[in-house]
Amino acid sequence: MSATPSGRRPGTTTLAAGPSPAPAEPRPGRSYRQLFDSRLLPILLVAPAIVVIGGLIGYPVIRTAWLSFTDADLSSLVSGEMSFIGLDNYIEALSDPTLRRAAIATVAFGLACVVGTMLVGIAVALLLNRAFRGRTLLSVLVLLPWAIPNVAASLVWRWIFHDQYGVLNWALSSLGLSSFDGFAWFNNWFTAFVVIGVVVIWQSFPLVSLVLLAGLQTISADVMEAAKIDGTTAWQRTRLIVLPLLKPLLLVLIVISTIWDFKIFDQIYILSGGGPARRTEVLAFTAYREAFTQSEFGLGSALAMILFIILIIVTIVYIRLIKDEEPTR
Amino acid sequence: MTALSASRPAMTAARARRRRRTTSVLTHLAALAVGVFSVFPLFWMVLTSVKPQSEIVTPEPVWWPSSFEFDRYPFVLEAGFTAYLRNSLLVAAGTTLLGLVVATFAGYALARFNLPLRRYLVLLILTTQLFPLVVLLIPLFIVMRNLGLLGSLWGLVIAYLAFITPLTIWILRGFFLSIPTDLEEAAQIDGCTRFGAMWRVILPLAGPGIAASAIFAWIAAWNEFLMALTFIRADEQRTLPVALAQFAGLEQTDHGAIMAASTMFTVPVVIFFLFVHKRLTTGMVAGAVKG
């Protein structure tokens, strides 16, 4: 290789290596530069990332796990004193009705959001895959909700769902549903969750639609045409051809949505603040609240760990599903 | 279609036409509904911010204002948002720069070199997406408190690296994987060092991908709420999302001003976003497929 002449080390003066030395060949005369390039350079390149990930993710996770077994509070931040209390925080998290409700809400509400997001996302993707005038425009417009920051999106929807001056209550009551006249969505935990769910779905369906649309466009037109000639209905084609072909993509999207929707915080903070009576709290919110407004760092850590464990379990289940899927394809 | 109409010509042709028309009408109606659902909130946000006060608080919505009032924007800026805007810009820019340097090198190394434990590193980077921010929040808060970084924008920049680095590594790795390795080999034969081959040949080629990841990192830092809420206590250090949430809490009834502040917060993101969305989705999907 022409790189050898630039080698300043005596070790590289093996001029006998002139007739093309294969770079992969492990030879004693290998230059320091080659060693640097193949061994040290890659490590130097990933080192900063490992420091960042280790220091900002690895260490905190281990520390949170540790704190979750202690009674750390505000005073222990100053003195560094805290005592080990075993599983007490976890026991409290599962026995206290408010905290337990937050754990259940995380799963139930999170799954509802995933289902909603997937349904809307699939429907919009199928729509955008049809030919109609204005399709290009619509595929850009659909992106807008994804681009809007959580806080801004929550504030707009709060305004749309406003009890007295909100557009939605006006629209619903002018459609004849007079019970929505001045209806206070945030006074009831269920309707408050409905609003939060609408915002979450509104923000997350564009990604699902976009990715699925890309997948849909890879399905060959011939297959669809053949199925059409065989006399299938549009619904049959969707169910029997399109969805099975998109299955791997759908599974990945479900995993991504689940990971997002189980961690919701911003929308709840802005829209309901966890109310009424702490009934719309989910684990991310409750952990924050216990730790930073009640200074119960130990309990907050335990709640955060429970959320983390739930996410790990759900992901493992999904990965199993994906793995089971693969041999049949 | 042709096979069927050959057997029963007249009737099916008419029925098929009618059916096609119904489908077309339904498609357009669905498209309209999706369009309204997607755009209306944004439209309503901007419109509310420029309506006269008397047309905001009405039992029946006013769809188009009788006159446009833009003075809410200077009002909001004077209410402290100039500083919040500056803070947000600084944090987003700092996070993007730092995160990008770290992620470009790592993404390249993970795409090209046979690192020990590479498989596990890639897997680890993917798993970090699982980690809820709250899990990191408490220890980071304690460490920053002890280091005196609470209330410093630098603290926020460092904290943001926690979630920005893994995702940008992931996206950039996907981009690097899509560039053929021949180019580096050719550059090395021409006398480039291994690092030079990456720096002079591959990075310029990955330029669009790097730009897309930069914008992505910028948007993520610009939008982040939970960490900013926890780590920044002094009012003059706040970033936009937290300031906006606080403003909306204090000025419960001034819907016009809240929407004006929201608009200012949203518009830069939307503009950036429309530039890069194509690259982002392809980057993410490519990375996922080649995992």
Image (cartoon, grey):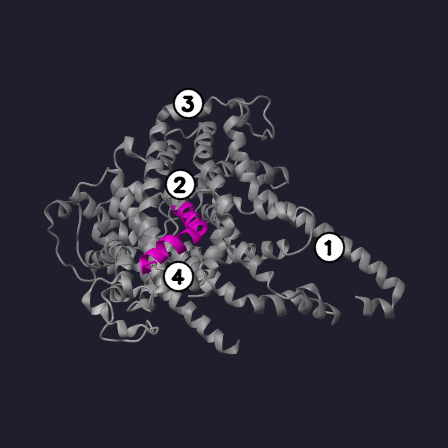
In the image, taking residue B206 as reference, residue A31 lies left or right, namely: left
Dot 3 or dot 4: first in sequence order is 3
Mark 1 element type = helix
Q: Is residue A196 left or right of residue A91?
A: right
Q: Which mark is residue B75?
A: 3
> Residue under circle 4?
B184
Q: In front: mark 1 or mark 2?
A: 1
Type of residue at label 4? Glu
Read off the chain for label 3: B
Q: Main secondary structure of the magenta part?
A: helix
Query: Which comes before the other along the chain, label 1 or label 4?
Result: 1
Q: Position of residue B148 (x, y in %)?
A: 17, 40
**On the image, numbered disc 2 is attached to which residue?**
A270
Identify which residue is drawn at 55% across, 55% down.
A209
| Chain part drawn in magenta | B192-217
Which residue is depicted at the point 52% across and 22% down? B69
- Sequence order check, earlier mark of 1 and 3: 1
Marks 3/4 same chain: yes
